[in-house]
Structures are given as C-alpha cells and as structure tokens.
Image: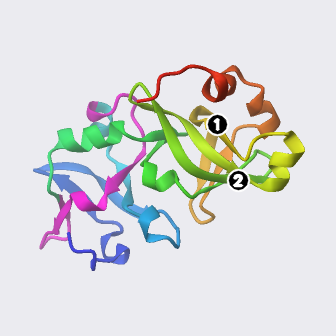
C-alpha cells in the first residue's frame, strides 16, 4: 500500500483476506513520531477472533505493510493469508481485551493507577517467544523517591488499560506494589532466558 493513503480514508472500512471478513479499521495510535505508528487498530470480527486467536480479543493491530489495496466497493484487501495475520497477532501484547503490536507500545507514557506518570516504555523483553516485560525509563523524581535504577522491567501483565488520545499505558496498581511482586523480581534479578 502507498503511504499516501491517509488514515482518514481507511477508518470504518471492512478488511478482507480472500473472501473472509477480518474486521473493521477503527483508527491508529495517536503519536507525533511516525516510527511509532506502523499499525492500524482493527475491531476484529468474533468468528475470526475465535478461530485465529489463542484467546479471543476485541481489537488487534493491522500492520500497514499488509494492506494491499482499496477495492472499488470500499473494502480493504490484505496482501497476505490469515495464517500470516495470525502469526503477527502472536507477536503482540495483550492489555485488557485488546492486542497491541510492539510499535504501538514503545514511547508510550506509563502511569500508575493514581494517574501519576512514572516514565515511558523504551523497549520490550521476550521470554520464550512471548513478551513478558516492558523496559520503563523512569522519571528522575520517581527513580530517586523509590531508590530504583533509571530503567526497570515491569511485567506486561501489570498493565490494566491504555488511553488512545493521551498515548498512555496505565498500571493496575502503584509502582511500589509492582516492585514488590515476584514477577518483577524474576524479570529484573532472575535468570529467565531471553529469546
């Protein structure tokens, strides 16, 4: 697909692989940095989610490079098979009832459950082909107050939700509580095998 096709032309269009309806484009991540916006947000049809996802999700990423063309009837055709889409969905992070591609996560602000910003995501860690942690570059005041290093690994299962317009990821609890978890200890000080 040409990069000239804007998001405005893609929103609310149905996406098909072969003759199968995959879902409807609902938007994309709101970020000023183009390298962080390589995927569209897709509302996945219930049948596709049930058949092609390990655990069905309501929304999922759709990489822009998979879009082949806009059809005359207004639908979007994907250039790859459902298996390729399924493979890409396996390389995502689940937050609440949605899947997020790595490019949708990096650069997002991280906020605790009291709406206090604690830092931003600078990378992700895979363990045995699954994203288990997010590298968070802490704000200096947060790092100093808690006596933590400048960068920590937070388990991705501690993210409770995201905000679309503010480009944030919200923790399910406070950072103090997260740092006391066994999964945090294992990620930061354990001997987990990285892929």
| Quarter where residue 78 is shown | bottom left
Say how the picture is coloured.
rainbow
Total marks placed: 2
Give how far across and how far down residue 2 sits, in percent: 22, 74
Residue 119: mark:
2
Q: Which residue is mark 1?
A: 154
Q: Is residue 179 visible?
A: yes
Tell me the SS state at disc 1: strand
Relative to 161, residue 47 above or below? above
Can residue 10 be found in the magenta stretch?
no
Give how far across and how far down residue 111 sits, in percent: 72, 51
Residue 95: mark:
none
Q: Is residue 110 visible?
A: no
Q: Residue at the spot x=25%, y=60% of the render?
A: 65
Q: Residue at the spot x=75%, y=46% of the render?
A: 112
Closest to the observer, 62 or 147:
147
In the image, is 116 to the left or to the right of 192? right
Q: Residue at the spot x=51%, y=52% of the render?
A: 105
Distance Cα–Cα, label 2 vs label 1: 11 Å
Label 2 neighbour load within 10 Å: few <14, some 14-19, many 20+: many
Q: What are the residue bounds of the magenta stretch? A: 51-77
Tell which residue pokes out farthest to the bottom in this image. Answer: 4
């Amino acid at each position: 697909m040409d990069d000239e096709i804007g998001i405005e032309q893609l929103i609310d269009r149905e996406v098909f692989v072969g003759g199968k309806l995959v879902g409807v484009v609902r938007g994309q991540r709101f970020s000023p940095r183009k390298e962080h916006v390589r995927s569209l947000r897709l509302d996945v049809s219930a049948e596709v989610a049930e058949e092609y996802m390990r655990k069905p999700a309501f929304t999922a990423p759709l990489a822009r490079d998979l879009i082949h063309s806009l059809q005359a009837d207004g639908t979007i055709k994907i250039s790859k098979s459902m298996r390729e889409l399924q493979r890409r969905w396996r390389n995502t992070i689940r937050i609440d009832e949605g899947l997020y591609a790595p490019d949708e996560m990096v650069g997002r602000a991280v906020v605790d459950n009291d709406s206090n910003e604690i830092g931003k995501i600078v990378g992700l860690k895979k363990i045995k082909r699954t994203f288990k942690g997010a590298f968070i570059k802490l704000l200096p005041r947060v790092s100093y107050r808690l006596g933590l290093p400048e960068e920590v690994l937070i388990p991705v299962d501690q993210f409770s939700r995201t905000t679309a317009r503010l480009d944030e990821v919200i923790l399910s609890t406070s950072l103090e509580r997260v740092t006391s978890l066994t999964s945090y200890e294992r990620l930061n000080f354990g001997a987990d095998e990285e892929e």
